[in-house]
Amino acid sequence: MQSMLTKFESKSSRAKGIAFHPKRPWILVSLHTSTIQLWDYRMGTLIDRFEEHDGPVRGIDFHRTQPLFVSGGDDYKIKVWSYQTRRCLFTLNGHLDYVRTVFFHHELPWILSSSDDQTIRIWNWQNRSLICTMTGHNHYTMCAQFHPKEDLVVSASLDQSVRVWDISGLRKKHSAPTSMTFEDQMARANNNQADMFGNTDAVVKFVLEGHDRGVNWVSFHPTLPLIISAGDDRNVKLWRMSETKAWEVDTCRGHFQNSSACLFHPHQDLILSVGEDKTIRVWDLNKRTSVQSFKRENDRFWVIAAHPEINLFAAGHDNGVMVFKLERERPAYAVHQNQIFFINKEKHVRSYDFNTSTESPSMLSLKKLGSAWVPPRTLSYNPAERAILVTSPADGGTYELINLPKDASGAVEPTDTRRGTGNSAVFVARNRFAVFNTSTQTIDIKDLSNSTTKSIKTPTTVNDIYFGGTGCLLLCSPAVVILYDIQQKKTIAELAVAGVKYVIWSNDGLHAALLSKHNVTIVTKTLEQVSSLHETIRIKSATWDDAGVLLYSTLNHIKYTLLNGDNGIIRTLDETVYLTKVKGRSVYCLDRQAKPKVLTIDPTEYRFKMALVKRNYDEMLQIIKNSNLVGQSIISYLQKKGYPEIALQFVQDPQTRFELAIECGNLEVAVEMAKELDRPKLWGRLGAEALSQGNHQVVEMAYQKLRSFDKLSFLYLVTGDKDKLNRMAKIAQHRSDYTSMFQNAIYLGDVETRIQMFKEIDLYPLAYVTAKAHGLTEECEAILEASGLTEDQIKLPAIGAPLTPARTIVSTHEKNWPLRAASQSFYEKALLGQVESMTLEDEPVTSGTNGFGFEDEADESKKFSGNLMDVDTEEDGGGWDMGDEDLGLEDHGDEFVNVESEIVGVGMSEAELWARNSPIAADHVAAGSFETAMQLLNRQVGAVNFAPLKPRFLEIYQASKTFLPASAGLPPLINYVRRTVDETDPRKILPIIPRDLESIRTSDLQKGFSAMKANNLEEGVQIFRNVLHTLLLTTVQSKSEVEDAKKIIQTATEYIIAMSIELERRSLASDESQVKRNLELAAYFTKPTLELPHRQIALMSAMKLAYQKKNHILAAHFASRILANNSQGKNAENARKIKAASERSGSDAVEIEYDQFAEFDICAASFTPIYSGQPFVQDPFTGAKYHPRYKGELCRVSQVTEIGAPASGLRLMAQ
């Protein structure tokens, strides 16, 4: 057997117990340091830590169906945990010494434990009671396990014996009561012989003696009546039992030190054992001979476990745990046209026809190829000669050239075979094949008689070879792929792609997919890169669709990628499969048992995207009309690609339809959706879009819905609609809105109304000046008389000729403006049947428009029925319910704003109302109530240092008021500036807050990004800190804006931490004694979540520093991350060079505290890691994490809030 395949390794203290989760890719590891770790071995991440035991934890086990696990340790306690709530549910006390092992029963609510107190105990975890204690061993009981099916328990002890216990009496005692006859009861009592203490629940059935020293582990076979045990005598013993007796079958000798644990392979006739001689050994169950041995350099093994479902094992040693396979499970296969040839688990060659979906009988038996336990690695097929070339890793690498029989007559041994040594073999022509030998780095070209015709020395160190087109090979080295011409013996092309394991050619031979562990790179036949993608889950296989789409499988998904790199998920997988061919909706594959399977998929999504890329509009229309292609991913994809009008066809949700309609300028759909949703924000956006298109009729409707009286008045002014402007004046009069009355009077040129209004509000000086300026002498005299003054007593400034409002030359209120055409896209016209065929070859042209570039008025009238004032069927007043010309208030109905409201208390200013109406600190600042604003910030975000907020306090306070000079000697008139300009209810009026969320996002945040890009880090930290201070004192109007504000806070926090780390590093850069800290800070600089270009800057900086300081493993890690983000450009080229150079060295000169596989955050004070599971405290405002020792100090990020302070959360919305 070849070396085992390690799938995951963790670094920790000594691992004493291991348990696989039966379904999820999780493994529990109990450590000698009292910690229990929960790992995701597929992702290589630590999920959780459990730390309640006092001392080493030796036993651990998952429940098969419940979200539970059990642990036992040196504190004599057995603890049952819930991994959902992440806490210990209860503790079982009773053992008097160390607990060695704990196991759940496969179906009953029992836990079996063994202990150094020489007892084995069974507990009921449902009622949390001890139900049985088994005594008999006279030394430490090291292990006890339930039989997987029968009512038996096996135990091992340092008294050198193995005992088998019958617990059928215990099952009957604790099972549900049934009606039994007296005879049955007597028979049951007689059958159960009591032990010396009168116990009939569990009795010793067999005592197995044969070990010369203590026995450390014992285990049942999953199906056969066999037992395996491992002891301090360095032996692994196999025992067999019957109903009446048990005996030793044989001993596996080979360990040089104590054998710690052993088990049976769940699916094969193998035994696995581990020992303190630092080895894992695999034995043939039938021959009891050693099959394979794996040795670690420094670590003793203590425990081994098998996954209950799949072919995975785990072994715990002095420095952690390793998860491994004994063999590759990928079947050897080759696809030719509509057939696949493959080798199954019995080493039989079979074929499968994709057209008929039928599997042939076995053609050949390859039992003699390599070792019995080593499956063949690859298979290459030659259709001209109907021959196969099979390689096996056995004996250092061998190959066989075999001619397939014409008829599948059974698993016969091949008679005419040609063998040789080599690690890879592949056909390169009709009568030639290439054999690669890793040890000599040579490629031999052989003919069908197995004679070498040419020998080639590889141009660099190569791991594997693949077919590269007729007469060519693809040579895969650790860091580069080479296209090599075997005729001319020269390199044609090179491409820097690391770790390529498989090459899959497209059906037309024009493209190939290079698969590595986590990456797919698509190249042309001349090795030019087309696209690449990265997966976090391991990639297992791939195949090409006839349309040129690559389908690939990971451990749990089938996915696709187009040539341009667009990708997505097709379906999830219950088990790992290896894709072989795609035909329509069927994916043909082989499972890990090498059995052909057919999976059904929906190719609609990737076919649609392919049609979009190729501009094949006919196929796109066909898919839209005949499929149910929906979902947020396809909508966002179309938006990203600039096709919102196509995305509109997939959407039913009104909000999304509105967004898309606005994006593509489809006012008709936007109006429809706005009416359905009827939200002020949507009407505002619709009005803005309609205004940009020149459709003032939709603008008018939007303003009506928003009650934007001032905007409506101005719209009527510029469109020349004097009748409606007069109505607006009357509405203002009924609303007692003097500002609006004044505005409308100016628009109308109505001097008398202005003078009358000034008189009503006791502004006689303004009334007099207005009358005087317009030459109204009689009115002037009346005003003087009412004021008790004469003209001589009044001093007036020089008055020029009064200005009259501009009049519209041509009234346009009956028709829309010719500003911007909102014509239908080519695609929309095709959807409506206006274009017969739309393909790339037949590109449509713009339909005829009038001289202004917009559609005919007749079409416009069809869309909006001529006058949008009439959309609500009211012939004159539209949705305003204007009533008769006298405009009595009783006739206006609900359409008008209610002018009646509660009377504000005497002496209460508007500023006091602001503070009363709002729980937002910014509103209190605007009101001048700084004290209450500080109290709010303290309660909401734990603010304690307000000095940095002083500029923001003053900015808000100064912006909330304007001052108009009054008459000489009088104080100025104070005008309070509101953000709720249309609100008349005094309980809802609120102040304007300068610099809203949009200005922060588009201005301040961008300045910070620019500072990061320009390397002005000190300035950048200050800019982002100002963003945080501004957001502390701002307001938003919707929940979506609240979420946006949270994202901006998170972004600013991440940038401040990142920049601060880099500034700290630069302060140490010249100190040679701080090289380790310098490297650590450079690595931590890459952890905060930055925008991609800035993340690349951090990674490049860290990579170069690591490479300069000869930390090559670290440099290669950063280079891989750079290439995963962007595989093209100058930076990518530098990363490839450094990665290649670093991988050749493969060592770190300076050991630093940076684990690339662990999940951790950065403490914002000490700039050191906070690993997952470690305690930490957070800043209540920024969310920055700190070590617990910093609790109560000032946050280093905001410099305003207290770390770990109790806080209710920042309020940004008044309602």
Image: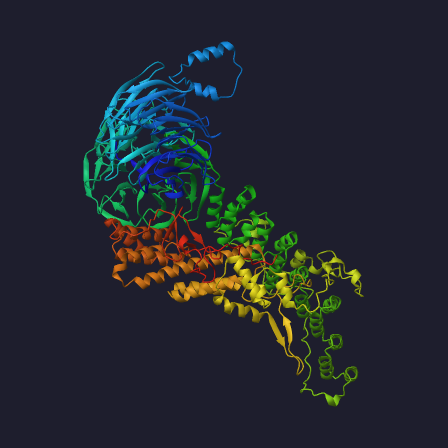
**Residue at (59% x, 47% y) in the render:** 652
* Rendered position, 369 above or below 949: above
**Could you say where residue 928 lies in the image, as x and y percent from the top left?**
58, 68
Left or right: 571 as drawn, with respect to 933:
left
Q: Is any part of residue 547 visible from this angle? A: no
Foreground: 582 or 782?
Answer: 782
Split into 4 quadrants, where in the image is the N terminus?
top left
Foreground: 640 or 1052?
Answer: 1052
* Rendered position, 57 above or below 799: above
* Rendered position, 780 above or below 645: below
Question: Where, by quadrant of the figure, is residue 1109 drawn?
Answer: bottom left
User: Number of callouts in the render?
Assistant: 0
Foreground: 1020 or 594?
Answer: 1020
**Could you say where residue 431 lies in the image, as x and y percent from the top left?**
25, 35
Q: Is any part of residue 746 visible from this angle? A: yes
Foreground: 488 or 86?
Answer: 86
